[in-house]
Amino acid sequence: MLFNKNMQLEASPKGIFALIIAVFSAVGYVIYLKILSGRYSPFFIIAVQNIIGLIYFLPIFLVF
């Protein structure tokens, strides 16, 4: 809940700011993906996303 019984804001301002940044990031991602889908096939876009995810998460799997 963002508000308590007295209608006062309980959420952290840092958390609200992080939420706003996340929403704008998602909107930017959707807009950019719409542009990319006009140039590349869906299979290629998903393959590139999976390869990038593999590169980012591979060190975590190797360490743990």
Image (cartoon, grey):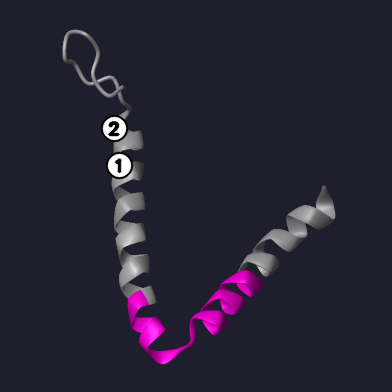
Amino acid type, residue under disc 2 in the picture: Pro
Element type where label 1 sits in the image: helix
Q: Measured from the top left, where is residue 23 in percent x and y?
A: 31, 52
Please provide percent x and percent y for residue 18: 35, 43
Name the residue at 69% across, 67% down: 54
10 Å neighbourhood of mark 1: few (<14), some, or many (≥20)? few
Q: Find residue 8 and report its image quarter.
A: top left
Q: Is residue 11 above or below residue 58?
A: above
SS type, badge 2? helix
On the picture, is 30 further left or further right than 61? Answer: left
* Most common SS among magenta residues: helix
Say which residue label 2 marks.
Answer: 13
Q: 54 left or right of 26?
A: right
The reply to whether dot 2 and dot 1 touch (C-beta < 8 Å) is yes
Residue with the most extreme left position: 7
Count of marks, rendered view: 2
Q: Which residues are magenta?
A: 34-52
Residue 42, above or below 27: below
Residue 51 is tagged as none
Q: Is residue 39 within the magenta segment?
A: yes
- The residue sitting at 79% across, 54% down in the picture is 61
The residues tagged by marks 2 and 1 sit, at their Cα atoms, a distance apart of 6 Å
Residue 10, position in %: x, y? 28, 19
Would residue 25 be found to the left or right of residue 59 on screen? left
For the residue carrying disc 2, how many other residues have a C-alpha within 10 Å: few (<14), some (14-19), or many (20+)? Answer: few
Residue 44 sits in which quadrant?
Answer: bottom right
Q: Which mark is residue 17?
A: 1
Amino acid type, label 1:
Phe
Give the quadrant of residue 6: top left
